[in-house]
Amino acid sequence: MHQGSALSALLFVIVMEAISREFRVALPWELLYADDLVMTAETEKDLIKSLNEWKNNVENRGIRVNMNKTKVMISG
């Protein structure tokens, strides 16, 4: 599947749903959308911990996480 294909996002969501089912916490803390993951946490420390757990879990299943594209937004 080449990047930009209409099926890329759909296939990504299907695969992420299947492999993340074991370790996902639940809404509203984690939200998969297309090829993105949105996470929320009460503190920055909790967010970093959750993000590292996600990264380790998906990488153990063969998916690479690009931390250079990771963005953090603090609200409050």
Image (cartoon, helix red, strand yellow):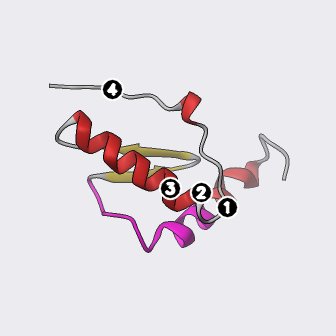
What residue would you read off at disc 3? 56
Residue 12 position by quadrant: bottom right
Identity, as a three-letter code, of the amino acid under mark 3: Asn
Between 54 and 3, the one lying in front of the other is 54
Residue 75 position by quadrant: top left
Labelled pair 2, 1 in contact (Cβ < 8 Å): yes
Q: Specify few, some or many for label 1: CA neighbours under 10 Å numbering under 14, 14-19, or 20 or more.
A: few
Mark 3–mark 2 distance (CA, rounded to whole Å): 5 Å
Q: x%, y% of residue 43?
A: 19, 37
Labelled pair 4, 3 in contact (Cβ < 8 Å): no
Which residue is at a point 59% across and 63% down the rendered structure image? 60
User: Is 23 located above or below residue 64 in the figure?
Assistant: below
Q: Which mark is residue 8?
A: none
Labelled pair 3, 2 in contact (Cβ < 8 Å): yes
Identity, as a three-letter code, of the amino acid under mark 1: Gly
Mark 4–mark 1 distance (CA, rounded to whole Å): 27 Å
